[in-house]
Amino acid sequence: MSYGPEARQWYQQELLRLRDAGLLKEERFIHGTQGAEIEVEFPEGAPPRRVINLCANNYLGFSGHPAVVAAAHRGLDDRGYGMSSVRFICGTQDLHRELERRLTRFLQTEDTLLFPSCLDANAGVFEALLDERDVMIADRLVHASIVDGMRLCKATQDTYKHSDMAHLEEKLAEYKDKRFRMVITDGVFSMDGDTARLDEIVALAERYQAMVLLDDSHATGFMGETGRGTHELCGVLGKIDLITTTLGKALGGASGGCVSGRRELVAMCRQRARPYLFSNSLAPMIVAGAIEVLDLIEHDTSFRDRLMGNAAYWRGLLVSAGFDVKSGQSPIIPVMLYNAKLAQDIARELLDEGVYVVGFFFPVVPKGQARIRTQVSAGHEKRHLDRGIEAFAKVGEKHGVRGMGRKELVDAFGL
Amino acid sequence: MVNAAVFSVPLPEGVQLDGSDRELLEAIAQAIASLRHGPGRPFTDIVTMLEADGWEVRSRIGWIAEARRGTAHEKAVGNSRGEALRDLLDLTLLDTVEGCP
């Protein structure tokens, strides 16, 4: 028996250590569809409670949207449950290629390749395109899947300080003798909800002849005037060489991701990206649902307009109620508490008050940067946000954190 | 120590060996000993086997830099200690925090 008592005991102790350190990730069970208001069972076995959801990536509210669900049903009925194959053997339906064409048009790129997830796209894209003659220079706060993808690639890895353009330029100059240079950034950073300085990154990339890869998972579908993403917001449509993004957030919230960009780069991923080559194709119902999402948003900005309106309204409510909120313009609005226990306590009490949020602390965010990350959706109505702020105000008042900035919070609660 | 070889080389005028020089010399001597006379399969056999399989093989002495913190472990290899440590620093900076999903 390979899994003997020694191994079992080691894993049991490790799990206990995580629990004792407050690092154990626990699931809460949602009864029903994802949405602005959900029924949550927590802890396991407790009767479900109806709560307002302020922590989903359901930015445009499409996770349970009737038109998207109906399209997925049609996809299931017409094209079956699964493909039982990778794309290049017998796993490509006309629908897969149609979705790739539609994403290309929406993102205003040259071509697109679907992946099982954006994590897979990021895991595969670097190794497929770069080797030891090249360099990857990433913002230090890029998504974990980019870090993993870079580690799988033999090109030199380097980083620049978060959104520090002078440091990026220094790095680009340092690597001028490399064959290819690739600058890598998120569009909207998931931790703070801030936006990449993409216009400046593109200008530097042009000056130093570097490619730009943008992970726009927290932006596709709503950032920018027509929701194309951060490249639209920053006025650099058509100038980003590679965009990786997800179907698992604004574009329906099921699963799936893509690499979209220069024709040859996408074609090379089709030949060499291992998660594409060795994973099953996206299920037809997800493809059909995603096409429906693009039908809904390609010529209609009302969903993203409602989302951005909700984000501004919610941000204003939090600021007026005296919370320390990270500045930004995305629907990710972190409420800063700095102390890990305080963030956990407030999140738990908010659930008791009917608001579902999660506290984030080290190692998910830097030490001394604990926060509650709130996320709004186009699916929220004003009454949801008004009820949400009532709960925040009540719990915040109880802990005495309202009106406190960083210094006061750290002085009162420590880091 | 079973055997030790002692040899001397002239130093340029005014040069004094410091701790880093001694450490480097010791590392080189250890590398020579293990490469030429170490236990296990002769490295030339492995090179021959890989070349027969179509690989173009190069091996050289280098520096390894490692960093551990809790369960995290980073390791970088370089032609010099400085190069290995610089790469090690880049690796640690890549995932200072896990980040949010």
Image (cartoon, coloured by chain):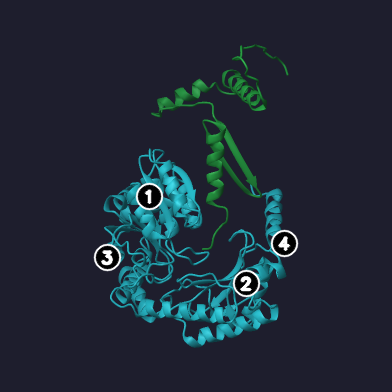
Could you tell which of marks 2 and 3 lies nearer the N-terminus? 3
Question: Which residue is labeled 1 in the image?
Answer: A273
Work out whether residue A205 or residue A27 is closer to the camera in this orientation and state it: A205
Q: Are marks 2 and 4 in contact (CB under 8 Å)?
A: no
Q: Colour of chain B?
A: green
Could you tell which of marks 4 and 1 lies nearer the N-terminus? 4
Amino acid bearing label 2? Gly
Chain of the residue under label 2: A
The residue positioned 57% from the left and 83% from the top of the image is: A389
Could you tell which of marks 2 and 4 lies nearer the N-terminus? 4
Find residue A20 and name its label.
4
Task: Bin the neighbour count of mark 1 within 10 Å (Cα to Cα): few under 14, some 14-19, many 20 and up.
Answer: many
Q: Are marks 1 and 2 in contact (CB under 8 Å)?
A: no
Indicate whether A213 appears above or below A70.
above
Mark 1 element type: loop
Amino acid bearing label 4? Asp
Residue B15 placed where, x, y %? 62, 19
